[in-house]
Amino acid sequence: MKRVLMGVLALAVFLPISATAGDFHRNATLICSDCHVMHFSQSHSYNADGSGSFTAIGGAGPHHYLLRNEINDLCLTCHNGSSSAPDVLGPNGGSSYVREAGALNREGDGHELTGHTLDSTDPAPGSSPLWSAANGMNCVECHRPHGAAGYRNLSGTPGNYSAETRTYAEISYVTGANDLTKDVYQVAAAPITDHYSVSNIFYNEPSAPTKSEGAYAFFCKGCHTNFHGDQGGTEVGGAGGEEWLRHPNSYANIGGMGGGHSSLATFTGRTNRVKVMSASGVWTPPAADNTPSCFSCHKSHGNQNAFGLIYMSGTGTVDEEGDDGTTARQLCKQCHIQGG
C-alpha cells in the first residue's frame, strides 16, 4: 500500500504516561526511530553499546517515507495485542478495560461489517461526493501520526472534508477538572487502564444550542457527509422540530420534543446508558440538556455488532458491544418508548 503520508501512527517505545490524549506522538513522546529507519537496515538499537529495543523492520521494503513497514502493519506493531499502548484491533490484548472507541477490524478477517475496516476500499457510507480510501483504509485517515493538540490526534481533514465549506476546529479536550468550553472531558490522564476506558470519557456540548452537533460529529462528517447537519438542513431535516430525514445529532435533546418521540425519563431509568453530550456537564442522573451524537450509537473504531452499534439494553455488565443487549432495537429503546 503506497500512499503520500507524513508518517504513521505507532509507538514502539511507550514512555511513562505523563502526557494527555492529544500529546502522544508529539513532543517527548514523538520518537522518530519508532516508525522510520534511515537506510532500511538496522542490527541494534541506538544506545552506544547497541542495547535497547527497536521496532523490527517489516515487509518487502524499503517503504515510502523511510517507514519501517506499510502503514497499517507498522501501526499495529504497537497497537495490537499490547498492554502498554492502546490496542485498536480485535480483543483488547493484555488489558481488561472497556475501550470507549472499541476495536477496528481488518479486510479479510470476517468482521468487515462491524465498524471501520483497515485496508478496505469500500465507499464510506453517506459520503458525498462518494469517497473511499483508494489504497485502503488506514490509521492516518483519521489520526495525525506526528501528533496534534486536539483530542486523540484526530486529523482535521478526513475523507471529503476538504470539499466542505465549514471551518474545521480541533476536537478540544480537558483532563482533570471539567471545562464546559471543551468538547471532551477526561477524568484522568493515567494509567492507560483509565485513559481510554468508557468510565473515563465524557462529552460536553460547548456550542449548544446553535451548533450542538459539536466538533466530534463535524469530524465524522468529513467522510459520512450526509449523516450530519443542522436542524432544518438538507442532510437531517427536522424543520420546526419535526420531519427528520435522518437521526438528529444536533439540537435534539433527549425528550425535548415531547409527544413520545423520545423520553428523558426512559433514558434516566436505564442502569446502563449510552454516552451523550451535555452543555451543563451533567450526565448522572441525566440532565434535560443531554443530546445524542455519533458515539451514542456507534463505537468509533467498531465492535462485534453490525456497524459498530452499541446494543445497550440498560442492564448487565457493560462491554464494548453494549451490555446484555443483543439487538439494535434495545439500543433504540435507550431513549424511545414506542412499541412497548
Image: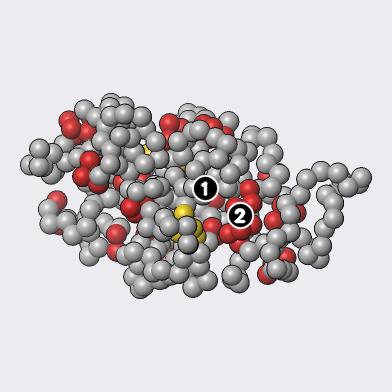
Q: From the viewer's perspective, is residue 22 above or below residue 289?
A: below
The x, y position of residue 223, in whole percent, is: 40, 63
Asked whether, in this view, residue 193 is left or right of residue 203, the answer is right
Q: From the viewer's perspective, is residue 120 above or below residue 322?
A: below
Mark number displayed over residue 75: 2
Residue occupying the point 43% across, 57% down: 110
Question: How far is disc 1 from disc 2 in space, using C-alphas?
Answer: 10 Å
Residue occupying the point 76% across, 49% down: 54
Residue occupying the point 33% across, 52% down: 306
Mark number displayed over residue 243: none
Q: From the viewer's perspective, is residue 254 above or below residue 109?
A: above
Amino acid on which the number 1 mark rests in the picture: Val
Foreground of the two, 10 or 120: 120
Q: In the structure shown, which secondary structural element does the residue marked by tag 1 occupy? A: loop
Asked whether, in this view, residue 158 is left or right of residue 316, the answer is right
The x, y position of residue 217, in whole percent, is: 36, 52
Mark number displayed over residue 88: 1
Amino acid on which the number 2 mark rests in the picture: Cys
